[in-house]
Amino acid sequence: MSLLEVDDIEVRYGAIRALKGVTFDVNEGEVVALLGANGAGKTTTQKTVSGMLRPSLGEIRFDGQRIDGIPAHQLIHLGICHVPEGRRVFPMMTVAENLEMGAFRFKKPDSTIHDRVIELFPRLGERYKQFAGTLSGGEQQMLAIGRALMGKPRLLLLDEPSMGLAPLIIKQIFDIVKEINEQGVTVLLVEQNAAQALALADRGYVLETGEIVLSGTGQELLTDDRIRAAYLGEEIAS
């Protein structure tokens, strides 16, 4: 069953058409990857799904309900949580306070969810009273994901979670995303690291200049010559 349906959306930045009739769906329980070069429209797509941008044309439905035009802070109440590119933690607030901010839609944070976040990210427990601005890049990424999980997402939007991180930390982050998904959270992933993203994803879509040009299962895209040449740096014999 489709949890998210994006139907023929167009998004403009002034006279520029950033998205040109983008259509895709995400089934409940899936990890779906959006791939593409810088400027292809991946982040714009996520921002439109999460209510930070409004499409000029097309429709977006979540669990059967039309949501395009609903503000981002209201979409969180439906279970759509967005971890933006660059982490965007509150640097002058502690780890504990950042996590509490993630649960703002509840009168009281759920201690069970809080404990699960600390279990997923033990480093956050070790840094619990530290200011978020003093954390390493990897720790800030863990905090950004943990903060989103505090909102009990049904759909988690992750934008470039591996950006700027060391390979060992990247593996940790992707292992945790896999575990989050196995616990029942649907994931829409934007990621430059195509090999890692497609190894994790059930399905993927490739964007070029605001249009979807290719789609398939994660495995199909991993073995596609066009993907291997464009995103995995492999030379394909003619």
Image (cartoon, helix red, strand yellow):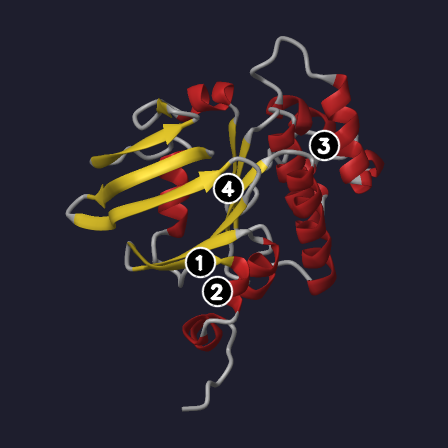
Q: Rounded to the nearest whole Å, what is the CA distance between mark 4 and mark 1? A: 25 Å
Other-residue count near label 1 (Cα within 10 Å), few / some / many at <14 / 14–19 / ≥20:
some
Q: Is residue 209 visible?
A: yes
Upstream in sequence: badge 4 or badge 2: 4
Other-residue count near label 2 (Cα within 10 Å), few / some / many at <14 / 14–19 / ≥20:
many
Camera-side mark, 4 or 1: 1
Measuring 23% from the left and 36% from the top, which residue is drawn there?
58
The residue that label 1 is drawn on is: 216
Q: Secondary structure at mark 2?
A: helix
Q: Residue lying farthest bottom?
A: 238
Q: Residue lying farthest left?
A: 15
Residue 118, image quadrant:
top right
Q: Rounded to the nearest whole Å, what is the CA distance between mark 3 and mark 1? A: 38 Å
Upstream in sequence: badge 1 or badge 2: 1
Q: Rounded to the nearest whole Å, what is the CA distance between mark 1 and mark 2? A: 6 Å
Please state which of residues 186 and 232 is positioned toward the viewer in this rendering: 186
Q: Is residue 88 visible?
A: no
Q: Secondary structure at mark 4?
A: loop
In the image, taking residue 33 as reference, residue 138 lies left or right, namely right
Upstream in sequence: badge 3 or badge 1: 3
Q: Rounded to the nearest whole Å, what is the CA distance between mark 3 and mark 2? A: 38 Å
Q: Which amino acid type corresponds to the residue marked 1 in the rendered image? A: Gly
Measuring 74% from the left and 25% from the top, which residue is drawn there?
114
Mark 3–mark 2 CB contact (< 8 Å): no
